[in-house]
Amino acid sequence: MAAVVLLAGCKAAPQIAAVVAGGAAGVATANPAVGFAVGVATDAGANYAFRYASRTWHQAEQDAIAQTAGALAVGAKAAWKIEHSIPIGNEHGLLHVVRAIDSPLAACKEIAFSVDDGEGAKLQRAWFTTSICKQAQQWKWAAAEPAVERWGYLQ
């Protein structure tokens, strides 16, 4: 289990899992075709699982920021934080509501937020901007995530 947790942030983790599973299946059955099939299936399943976990984690962080900022007036500042059920990747920072954007379609806000790393003298703060919009009775992240890794330079 510890190896799985250590590989969770590794981009090659699905391929590593596929090689291990495929190799084990190939040796156990003495059939390289079975090993190959198990490896391909393991890679596909692991890729799906890692992408799903990443999307879920990012959405929770975005929702925490949007809910905190949604309750604030223009010009207000507050701290935000997310504590995941598995205590890996808990984030925190500050946010500032820059302006309100009211339209017939939705009530939106532009915000600036930080993601803080470290504490005290070693604190590093990275700032970002985004938009949030009110959807039914809750505020949601309105900006699309960058897709450079997925699409390369075609974006």
Image (spheres, rainbow, N blue to C red):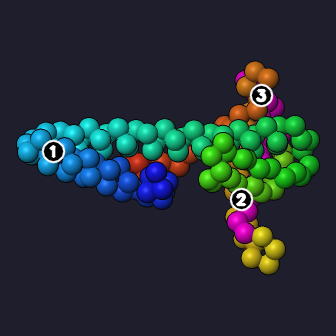
Q: Nearer the viewer, residue 136 or 106?
A: 136
Up/down of 93 relative to 52, above or below? below
Which residue in the structure is indicated by mark 3?
138
Q: Residue 27: percent from the left, percent from the top? A: 14, 49
Q: Residue furthest front?
A: 28
- Give the amino acid at mark 1: Ala
Identify the image quadrant of residue 34: top left
Residue at horizontal 88 percent and vertical 51 percent from the top: 78
Q: Secondary structure at mark 1?
A: helix
Residue 97 forms part of the magenta stretch = no
Q: Estimate how packed mark 3 is, as few (under 14), some (14 to 19) or many (20 or more) residues with alpha carbons within 10 Å.
A: few
Residue at horizontal 15 percent and vertical 44 percent from the top: 28
| Left or right, residue 48 beside residue 62 | left
- Give the amino acid at mark 3: Gln
Which residue in the structure is indicated by mark 2?
115
Q: Secondary structure at mark 2?
A: strand
Q: Nearer the viewer, residue 139 or 119?
A: 119
Which residue in the structure is indicated by mark 1?
28
- Give the amino acid at mark 2: Val
Residue 104 forms part of the magenta stretch = yes
Q: Are marks 3 and 2 in contact (CB under 8 Å)?
A: no
Residue at horizontal 78 percent and vertical 70 percent from the top: 119
